[in-house]
């Protein structure tokens, strides 16, 4: 761990326990900081709070006392999910106290170079692709961040021989101050999380923190096909590495129908790529560019491109059964993601869709429904999706009780050569606690066939 004593004697408030708050507390306490933890949930039944109390750490549960900031804290480290209109956060900002997320801690203590990856879509796939490329290439990568492993815990254990591949959400990036990855990747930009950030501009500004502190010694890989990202790239001091699907480019990484090019030179044939979809090709270009910049062997990159079939629940190839290919895209909780999934296939498709009704229309899916021959609708939006599918001229539309029932109904309606795709365009919470649970049950039902 770099600069282990930099927090020694500092008074630090951890706002929100959860996974990231717990990890930050343990790290800072070990580093000699005077830590207070404040969590809104009650102390009763809170195992993490009980453990921290047993170690002599001050823990205040059950709400946020209005006078909690009267003790002149040096830093507030908040859970990324806590909004900035939280009264404690607002008061800390008013008093000029820095408000961080634990990702800032990770960047301050890491001996390993960091590759930071953000974007409205594709973060997890890009992160996972790059991790596998570096792993096969012998670069000793560690995976961290929004993908599920707390970044400061990974950074605490990392050495200069490792590379941290870090997925960064806008929530996490908004709470950074000096965060500076050696390589920053921004996959794309679409309006998202506006209930948290308030405006499109504030959301994009949070995303740009991935490159804001970079210098000419660093690299910024960005989507050159999006005008808004090109504008942000002009603000970055890093070496620009654009990626594009618009044919061969002289700079950065690009692709046409046959090849991937690196700085205008043929690099690898697209025919080796296993992962379907134009949106995934963007993720592949971004990950490949970072792997090349980190000295990864071309054979390692090709190995991953020819074998990687998707992150679980994100356009994940599940199985081929008597000519039918099953794909689990349970993470598609909005129409934008389902559009990308439908655009990935030219074959006749049986679409399983529907879920939590947030009052949204499905009309923007209409241009992508041309290959859909069957729709099986589930969840709260089942009737709404049935009406939408009928308006698109889908030949066969049926209703299912749940995802497992949908799989059982899909198979007899399919033929060899068809795609059976779970891409709900809706959140899962009407029937399932998470999209992961929904996707797991889809996989289970496929295996039962």
Image (cartoon, rainbow, N blue to C red):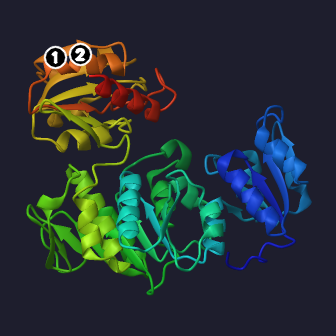
| Left or right of 47 in this view: 320 | left
* Residue 296, horizontal then vertical, whole percent: 34, 76
Give the Cα distance between marks 1 and 2.
6 Å
* Residue 411, horizontal then vertical, whole percent: 19, 21
Q: Nearer the viewer, residue 292 or 375?
A: 292
User: In the rendered image, which quarter is residue 299 located in?
Assistant: bottom left
Residue position for label 2:
409
Which quadrant does the N terminus fall into?
A: bottom right
Asked if residue 224 can be seen in this view, the reply is no
* Residue 7, horizontal then vertical, whole percent: 79, 72
| Left or right of 21 in this view: 170 | left
User: Which disc, if any, is residue 12?
Assistant: none
Residue at (88%, 48%) from the top-left corner? Answer: 53
User: Which disc, if any, is residue 412?
Assistant: 1
Number of residues whose C-alpha sits closer than 10 Å to that of mark 1, classed few (under 14), some (14–19) or many (20 or more)? few
Q: Kindly state the secondary structure of the residue where label 1 is placed.
A: helix
Residues at badges 1 and 2 in contact (C-beta under 8 Å)?
yes
Number of residues whose C-alpha sits closer than 10 Å to that of mark 2, classed few (under 14), some (14–19) or many (20 or more)? some
Residue at (43%, 46%) from the top-left corner? Answer: 192
């Amino acid at each position: 761990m770099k600069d282990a004593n930099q927090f020694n004697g500092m008074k630090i408030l951890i706002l929100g326990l959860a996974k990231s708050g717990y990890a930050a507390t343990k790290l800072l306490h070990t580093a000699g900081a005077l830590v207070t933890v404040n969590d809104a949930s009650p102390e009763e039944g809170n195992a993490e709070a009980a453990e921290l109390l047993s170690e002599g750490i001050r823990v205040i549960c059950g709400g946020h006392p209005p006078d909690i900031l009267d003790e002149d804290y040096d830093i507030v480290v908040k859970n990324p999910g806590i909004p900035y209109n939280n009264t404690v956060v607002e008061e800390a900002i008013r008093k000029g106290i820095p408000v961080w997320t634990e990702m800032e801690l990770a960047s301050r203590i890491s001996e390993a170079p960091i590759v930071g990856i953000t974007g409205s879509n594709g973060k997890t796939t890009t992160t996972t692709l790059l991790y596998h490329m570096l792993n096969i290439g012998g670069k000793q990568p560690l995976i961290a961040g929004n993908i599920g492993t707390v970044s400061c815990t990974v950074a605490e254990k990392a050495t200069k021989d490792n590379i941290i591949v870090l997925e960064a959400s806008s929530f996490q990036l908004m709470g950074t101050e000096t965060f500076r990855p050696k390589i920053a990747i921004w996959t794309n930009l679409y309006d998202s999380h506006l209930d948290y950030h308030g405006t499109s501009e504030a959301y994009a500004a949070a995303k740009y923190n991935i490159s804001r502190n970079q210098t000419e010694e660093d690299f910024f890989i960005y989507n050159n096909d999006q005008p808004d990202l090109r504008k942000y790239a002009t603000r970055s001091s890093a070496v620009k590495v654009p990626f594009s699907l618009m044919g061969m480019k002289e700079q950065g990484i690009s692709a046409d129908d046959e090849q991937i090019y690196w700085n205008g030179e043929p690099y690898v044939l697209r025919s080796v790529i296993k992962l379907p979809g134009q949106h995934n090709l963007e993720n592949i270009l971004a990950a490949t560019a970072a792997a090349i910049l980190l000295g990864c062997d071309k054979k390692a990159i090709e190995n991953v491109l020819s074998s990687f079939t998707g992150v679980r629940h994100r356009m994940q190839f599940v199985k081929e059964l008597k000519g039918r290919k099953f794909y689990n895209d349970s993470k598609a909780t909005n129409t934008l993601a389902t559009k990308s999934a439908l655009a990935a296939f030219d074959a006749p498709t049986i679409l399983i869709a529907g879920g939590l009704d947030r009052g949204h229309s499905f009309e923007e899916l209409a241009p992508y429904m041309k290959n859909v021959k069957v729709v099986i609708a589930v969840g709260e939006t089942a009737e709404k999706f049935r009406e939408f599918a009928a308006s698109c001229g889908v030949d066969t539309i049926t209703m299912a009780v749940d995802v497992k029932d949908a799989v059982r109904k899909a198979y007899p309606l399919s033929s060899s050569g068809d795609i059976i795709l779970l891409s709900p365009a809706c959140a899962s919470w009407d029937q399932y606690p998470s999209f992961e649970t929904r996707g797991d049950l889809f996989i289970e039902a496929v295996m039962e066939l």
